[in-house]
Image (tube, rainbow, N blue to C red):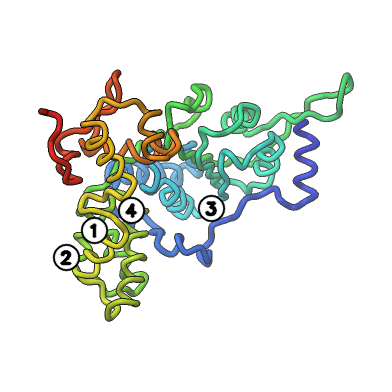
Amino acid sequence: MIEEDFSSKRKQGTVTSPVITDDTDAFENTLRPQDFANYIGQTEVKKNLKVFCQAAKKRGEPLDHTLFYGPPGIGKTTLSLILSKELGTNLRITSGPALEKPGDLAAILTNLQENDFLFIDEIHRLRSSVEEILYSAMEDFVIDIVVGKGPSARTMRLNVPRFTLVGATTKAAMLGGPLKDRFGHVERLRFYESTEVQKIIERSAGILEIDIEKEAAEKLAHCSRFTPRIANRLLRRMRDFAEVLHNGKITLKVVEEGLDNLCIDNRGLDYADQMYLKILGEKFKGGPVGLSTMAAAMGEDENTIEDMIEPFLIREGFLQKTPRGRIVTELGLSQVGVKNLLAV
């Protein structure tokens, strides 16, 4: 029953998710830009969002519900934070898997303030019973809760403050049509250019007070898979190598040695990526090979291979997926130093 879940959450004082504020201690938030001026990349999306924010301010209305979709680590959460700051409201954060019962969502919605932002990460993983609560909340700012049990049970309609739902997903195709159609803005975030990633690395280095050479930042950018989250992670690891093994400054030599220690090559392929291509090229003569066979050969789970290894290899032209199975390309073979067996 929604009413029971709702009441228990209120009593426990767990009805709201954490609020992002200026003094948040989480390390990731120290690197997040706080406004559009400092947000690097996604030029087209930024331009649109600026207009939407200005229009909402002018009308004195909350921003329309917004959906961001795209690969992980490219700024969906950061853009949500910037939107809330642009409109001077709170941003409350939760995730699809965390909302297990309808009462969890009902408790959060009723504790929002007027014009607040509610950010739901991985929104495609919402349970159907929880998702249905959002329909009326997004359109009419009301929710229906069940009071009582059995034959005497009745539905009670409860008003919620006018709010903006910001959803983020890496799998937009898994979103139900009724939910997706209720978003006023749907924005696709793309991968970054190497020059944009380099600017992000240099900006993060300045915030963390890291001394880094331009050539080192450029090298890191090329190995970051065009993803800011990976770039910032590599920057922190290079800082560790520089402080312990060198004089504290991140030079090109430090980056080259650090990447070698982390088994990351000049295109950003890590150990698992390289092993995948080598096994496919050497053991199976380039393919085609089925997913289950590759999983057994690597000792990895099939989902791990499909979700974490193959997408980048396919996007960069190292791998092809065909009806017969996986086939390594000539570019993939040369990247891991395997002799071209495709022509044999």
Q: Number of labelled discs?
A: 4
Q: Which mark is residue 228?
A: 4
Q: Residues within 10 Å of mark 4 (few under 14, many from 20)?
A: many
Callout 3: helix, strand or loop?
Answer: loop
Q: Which residue is mark 1?
A: 198
Callout 4: helix, strand or loop?
Answer: helix
Query: Which is nearer the N-term, disc 3 or disc 1?
Result: 3
- Label 3 vs label 1, nearer the camera: 1
Which x, y percent locates residue 321? 28, 26
For badge 4, the amino acid type reads Pro
Q: CA distance from mark 3 to mark 1?
A: 31 Å
Position of 129 relative to 170 (above/below): above
For badge 3, the amino acid type reads Thr
Mark 3 vs 1: CB contact within 8 A: no
Q: CA distance from mark 4 to mark 1?
A: 9 Å
Q: Which residue is mark 2?
A: 215
- Label 3 vs label 4, nearer the camera: 4
Mark 2 vs 1: CB contact within 8 A: no
Observer-nearest of 83 and 323: 323
Observer-nearest of 225 and 175: 225
Q: CA distance from mark 2 to mark 1?
A: 10 Å
Position of 247 relative to 342 (above/below): below
Residue at image point 85% right, 24% down: 153
Q: CA distance from mark 3 to mark 2?
A: 40 Å
Query: Which is nearer the N-term, disc 4 or disc 2?
Result: 2
